[in-house]
Structure formats: structure tokens, C-alpha cells
Image (cartoon, rainbow, N blue to C red):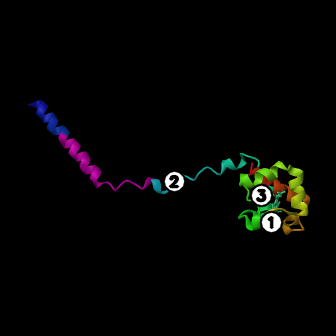
Amino acid sequence: MSKRKIVVLGMGIIVQALVACGKQTPAEPAAAAPAPEPAAAVAAAAPVNELGKSVYGKTCAMCHAAGVAGAPKPGNKDDWGPRIAQGNDTLYKHALEGFTGSKGMMPARGGSTSLQDGDVKAAVDFMVAQSH
Ligand code: HEC
């Protein structure tokens, strides 16, 4: 008999616990405010040709990014392969002095005469690095 009493008592506790739970407010939306991501620790990973990237973005991308007038797009290995094979000196010369090839006309310094030689070369390096 006493065993049965314990079972009933136990059931009572469980029921009470369930009722108590039911009264509690729904679980907090814990996922609503995730902890802020650790600041871009990745940024320092690889050395980036910042100068070339900036010059490219300001001056060269207007033709090269979309392949306007036959400009070779960075990352287009088929187009860049034979150009890279000429060697950097030729690419620099063509970028600095201008160049007319079978596809179109590359204006000297991309048409931006205020660019220093180093700026233009950095931009060439930037495009070449994406096109190997
Ligand atoms: C007005 C459009 C235009 C702008 C701006 C421009 N390019 Fe070009 N570029 C071309 C075209 C078109 C070609 C392809 C010419 C061909 O092969 O017929 C080319 C080709 C090149 C080549 C390959 C040359 C070779 O020997 O194959 C390099 C390197 C280059 N551009 C660098 C640059 C750099 C660096 C800038 C920015 C400073 C720049 N270009 C801005 C149109 C442009």
C-alpha cells in the first residue's frame, strides 16, 4: 500500500512541476541578440596591393571591370594569359604609354595623366595578380 502512495505522491509532484512550467512566460528569444562577431580579424591575413586596388578602382575599372571596348577583365585567364606571358615590363610599358592591340585601344595611363608611374604599375600588378 505504501508503495502506491509514493507513486501517487510522485505523480502529484510531476503534475505540479508541469503546471508551474506552464505558468512561466515563454522562453526568451535568446537568439534575438547574438553576440557581436569578433572584429574582422581576417583583414590582416594577406598583404593586399592597396595602391593598385585603389588606382584600378578609380581609373582602370571603368573599362577593365566590364571589358569595355575589348579591355581584358581581371580574372579572365584566357585573355590575360598571353598578355602576362609578354612579361611585366611590356605590360607596364603598354599601360604607361598606351597600346593598340587587336581588341581595342588602351589609353596611356588609362587616360589619367596625373597618375605616377608607380600608380600605374601597381594597378597592372593588381590586375595581373587576379588573372594568373
Ligand atoms: C578607356 C578604357 C581603358 C581604360 C580606362 C584602361 N584600359 Fe587598359 N586596356 C584597354 C583596352 C581596350 C585594352 C586591350 C587592348 C588590346 O589588346 O587590343 C587594354 C589593355 C591593357 C593592358 C594589357 C596590355 C597588353 O600588352 O596586352 C594592361 C596592362 C592595361 N590595359 C592596364 C591598364 C591600367 C593599369 C589602367 C588604369 C590605370 C587601364 N588599363 C585603364 C582599355 C582601357
Which residue is painted at 22% across and 42% down in the image?
A: 13
Judge depth for marks 1 and 3 and give the one in front: 1
Asked if residue 62 can be seen in this view, the reply is no
Please tell me whether the stretch drawn in magenta is mainly helix, strand or loop: helix
User: Is the residue indicated by label 1 positioned so its CB lies within 8 Å of ligand 1?
Assistant: yes
Q: Residue 104 got which mark?
A: 1
Q: Is residue 125 left or right of residue 24?
A: right
Q: Secondary structure at mark 3?
A: helix
Question: Which residue lies under the disc numbered 2?
Answer: 34
Q: Residue 53 got which mark?
A: 3
- Residue extending farthest to the front is 102
Which residue is painted at 72% across and 52% down in the image?
A: 77
Earlier-in-chain disc, 3 versus 2 = 2
The amino acid on which the numbered mark 1 sits, given as a three-letter code, is: Gly
Q: Is residue 45 above or below residue 61?
A: above
How far from the left and from the top, in percent, is residue 15?
21, 46
Magenta residues (range): 11-30
- Residue extending farthest to the left is 1
Judge depth for marks 3 and 2 and give the one in front: 3
Q: Tell me the quarter of the image containing the N terminus.
A: top left
Q: Residues within 10 Å of mark 2 (few under 14, many from 20)?
A: few
